[in-house]
Image (cartoon, rainbow, N blue to C red):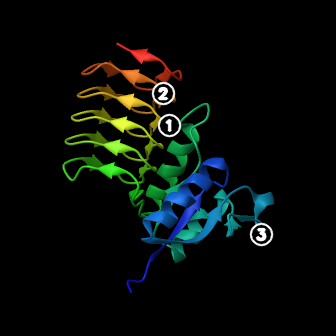
Amino acid sequence: MTKKTDIILIGGGGHCKSCIDVIEQEDKLSIAGIVDLQENIGKKILGYPVIACDDDLADLAKKYSNFIVTVGFINSPDLRLNLYRRVKELNSNLPVVISPHSYVSKHSEIGEGSMVFHNAVVNADAKVGVNTIINSCCLIEHDAVIGDHCHISTGAIVNGGARVGDQTFYGSGAVSKEYISVPDKSFIKAHSIIK
């Protein structure tokens, strides 16, 4: 039996619970603990302990090599982006996590620290940037390019050849026309049609 690699999750909210489920299903990483608010240290999230707060990241990096940002993208990408940068400054790894219940083409590219959730599809020659959420049941079609630090929400569709700029929130059920470009830092409302 192959020994699993330890990983620290950064962020203990609702999005963290979905991340835990994907990590457990993928069965390659062992969750060593969660980083969250100081007042939550000692509590558990789905059975995993909150062991530290953001101020402890440098100390954790002396013991652990792998981290993933499990803070959601609510109103802004800033917190996810800042946490990603802090991990990079510590020379730590941000593995790609892919649900075994998703389909990711062997001809696609997924950037470090990104996560592909259950029942998502990333098709041939699609490219997903770093620290990006490809959430449950969404479709990234062939030749589509998703930038860094994005959140492609549940059930969203990015059609063939479309480009989604960095730090974009792409709402649940939104659908793009093929080969369009969405600018950096866009906020796409749920169920939008992007032409």
Question: Who's the residue at 49% across and 50% down the image?
Answer: 84
Secondary structure of residue under mark 3: loop
Of residues 85 and 185, which is closer to you in this image?
185
Q: Quadrant of residue 75?
A: top right
Q: Which residue is mark 1?
A: 154
Q: In the image, residue 119 lies at what x, y percent?
A: 42, 47
Amino acid on which disc 2 is placed: Gly
Can you name the residue that lies furthest to the right here?
Answer: 39
Q: Are marks 2 and 1 in contact (CB under 8 Å)?
A: yes
Q: Which residue is mark 2?
A: 173
Element carrying mark 1: loop
Query: x%, y% of residue 5?
Result: 44, 75
Left or right relative to 157: residue 10: right
* Residue at which label 3 appears: 42
Q: Are marks 3 and 2 in contact (CB under 8 Å)?
A: no
Q: Percent from the top left, x then y, of residue 8?
A: 55, 66
Please tell me whether mark 2 sits on a helix, a strand or a loop: loop
C-alpha separation, residue under disc 3 versus residue under disc 2: 37 Å
Which residue is situated farthest in the bottom direction here? 1
Q: Quadrant of the N terminus?
A: bottom left
Cα separation between marks 2 and 1 = 7 Å
Q: Nearer the viewer, residue 56 or 167?
A: 167
